[in-house]
């Protein structure tokens, strides 16, 4: 079986179309959301599906206490190596669907880089929200970023979506993205396939990831929050803006849930 792109944390970052400055801008916006929606100071943060925790490293550098969880040992090892100087950044290897942590309750949780929709089944969505709810203080906030999904259409057969060339340092990459068919009754909006061919000096390696994307809208997130019995949705902000209407969302929206 071909390995996952998460085996190569720095290559993963090049393969994703991350815009320069995107992560610092997201962190600044998160801090503004916490100030706006929480009366008490927000100091302890849980970074869910953290990868090598780019958000967590910025927050820890600014004095926040951050704990990241992820299932990928290589992403976690990269996070520990990159954050080795930060004593207030820790990691645990956990699956996001259901987890417990040996940690004091958090003020806020974040789930960034549009990964929340990988939780497909209803039961897993609810057990995820309950796990996060148990980890948070009452009144704590859970911020989740989600891409606007209606720009991708359903396909009858595996279809190439995009192809591009990139580099991770000196290593050339060829990235091909596909859209896969899904059943009409599936809770998925789409099935995304990421293929990355890496030209290492000693030969080629191809990674392949199949990423299910559950159809997620502000209204469905609100319903899941209520169904979990743990959260109430308090806001949905488009494109890191407090003033733009959700109707005008171009790229991504941030759902803000409050622990009840
Ligand atoms: C797109 S990366 C985002 C990482 C990080 N939040 C960032 O902004 O760079 C998605 C991460 O989700 C993790 N992940 C995906 N499914 C997971 C699961 N079921 N349990 C735990 N981690 C998961 C992957 O290992 C990967 O590190």
Image (spheres, rainbow, N blue to C red):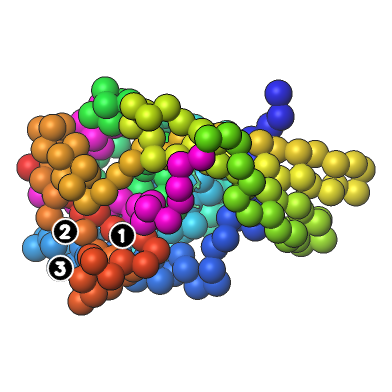
Relative vertical location of residue 119 with respect to residue 49 in this rendering, above or below:
above
Q: In terms of secondary structure, where does tag 3 sit?
A: helix
Residue 200, percent across and down? 85, 47
Rate crowding at label 2 as few (under 14), some (14 to 19) or many (20 or more) other CA atoms within 10 Å. Answer: some
Relative vertical location of residue 165 with respect to residue 66 in this rendering, above or below:
below
Disc 1: which residue:
253
Number of the label disc, if any, that sits on residue 235 = 2
* Left or right: residue 253 compared with residue 183: left
- Of all residues, the one furthest to the bottom in this rendering is 243
Q: Which of marks 3 and 1 is nearer the N terminus?
A: 3
- Mark 2 and mark 1 in contact? Answer it, CB < 8 Å: no
Relative vertical location of residue 23 with respect to residue 232 in this rendering, above or below:
below
- Of all residues, the one furthest to the right in this rendering is 202
Give the label, 3 or 2, closer to the camera: 2
Magenta segment range? 127-155
Q: Distance between the residues labelled 2 and 1?
A: 10 Å
* Left or right: residue 245 compared with residue 168: left
Rate crowding at label 3 as few (under 14), some (14 to 19) or many (20 or more) other CA atoms within 10 Å. Answer: few
Depth check: give the residue in front, 93 or 3.
3
Residue 1, percent across and down? 71, 23
| Residue at figure coordinates x 13%, y 62% from the top left | 37
* Left or right: residue 201 compared with residue 238: right
Q: Which of marks 3 and 2 is nearer the N terminus?
A: 3
Q: In terms of secondary structure, where does tag 1 sit?
A: strand
| Residue at figure coordinates x 42%, y 56% from the top left | 151
Does residue 75 show up magenta in the picture?
no
Ligand 1 contact, mark 3 (Cβ < 8 Å): no
* Left or right: residue 66 compared with residue 32: right
């Amino acid at each position: 079986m071909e390995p996952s792109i998460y085996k190569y944390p720095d290559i993963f970052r090049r393969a994703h179309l991350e815009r320069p400055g995107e992560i610092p801008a997201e962190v600044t916006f998160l801090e503004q959301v916490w100030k706006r929606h929480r009366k008490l100071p927000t100091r302890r943060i849980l970074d869910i599906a953290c990868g090598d925790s780019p958000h967590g490293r910025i927050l820890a550098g600014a004095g926040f206490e951050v704990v990241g969880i992820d299932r990928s040992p290589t992403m976690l090892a990269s996070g520990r190596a990159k954050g080795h100087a930060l004593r207030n950044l820790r990691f645990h290897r956990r699956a996001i669907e259901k987890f417990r942590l040996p940690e004091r309750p958090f003020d806020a949780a974040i789930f960034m880089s549009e990964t929340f929709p990988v939780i497909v089944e209803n039961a897993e969505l609810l057990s995820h929200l309950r796990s996060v709810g148990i980890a948070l203080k009452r009144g704590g906030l859970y911020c989740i970023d989600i891409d606007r999904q209606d720009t991708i259409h359903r396909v009858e057969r595996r279809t190439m979506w995009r192809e591009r060339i990139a580099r991770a340092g000196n290593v050339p990459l060829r990235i091909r993205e596909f859209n896969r068919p899904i059943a009409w009754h599936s809770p998925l909006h789409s099935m995304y396939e990421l293929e990355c061919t890496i030209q290492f000096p000693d030969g080629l390696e191809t990674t392949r990831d199949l990423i299910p994307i559950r159809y997620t809208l502000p209204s469905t997130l609100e319903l899941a929050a209520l169904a979990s019995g743990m959260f109430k949705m308090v806001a949905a902000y488009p494109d890191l803006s407090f003033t733009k209407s959700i109707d005008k969302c171009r790229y991504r929206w941030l759902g803000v849930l409050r622990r009840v």
